[in-house]
Image: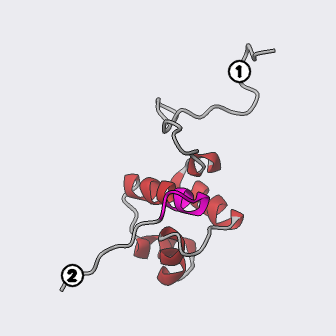
Amino acid sequence: MSSLIEMPDRSSARGRVAGEVRAELARARISGNKLAALLGQSQPYWSRRLSGKVAFDVDDLEALSGLLGVPIARFFIAPGMPGPSGPDGGWAPWGSNPRPAD
């Protein structure tokens, strides 16, 4: 008998954030067990957040951002919004547009 991994419901903000975090962890090839060891929380703690059952708090997202070397905003993709692209992940620092719209 095999077990299925329950995926977060991406129709909710909590589910979208969990999905983006899972995607970044997969890109970095970091498993749930390795994540727990690296950040000092238990594997079930992270599993509940990655499944979308429990919402990430700001401290969790800050720790993940530092571990993965990505901006914390990477975890907040709006529905229908294209994902980040480009060599820097597509994210620019706030106020970096040299010609903002008036």
Q: Amino acid at mark 2?
A: Ser
Q: Which residue is mark 2?
A: 2
Q: Quadrant of the N terminus?
A: bottom left
Q: Closer to the camera, 50 or 68?
A: 50
> Residue 48: x percent and y percent?
52, 77
> Residue 44: x percent and y percent?
49, 83
Q: Which residue is mark 1?
A: 97
Check the image and report above or below for 99 versus 66. Answer: above
Residue 14 among those drawn in magenta: yes
> Residue 45: x percent and y percent?
54, 80
Sequence-wise, the earlier of marks 2 and 1 is 2
* Residue 67 seen in this snapshot: no
Q: Quadrant of the C terminus?
A: top right
The residue carrying pointer 2 sits among few (fewer than 14), some (14 to 19) or many (20 or more) residues within 10 Å by Cα, namely few
Colour scheme of the picture: secondary structure
Check the image and report above or below for 97 versus 53. Answer: above
The magenta segment = 9-18
The residue carrying pointer 1 sits among few (fewer than 14), some (14 to 19) or many (20 or more) residues within 10 Å by Cα, namely few
Hey, which quadrant is residue 64 in on the image? bottom right
Q: CA distance from mark 2 to mark 1?
A: 50 Å
Q: Secondary structure at mark 1?
A: loop
Q: Give the residue displayed 54% in from the left and 72% down from the top.
A: 49
Hey, which quadrant is residue 91 in on the image? top right
Q: Amino acid at mark 1?
A: Asn
**Cβ–Cβ below 8 Å for labels 2 and 1?**
no
Q: Give the residue displayed 64% in from the left and 31% down from the top.
A: 92
Extreme residue toward the left, this view: 1
Give residue 67's mark.
none
* Residue 23 seen in this snapshot: yes
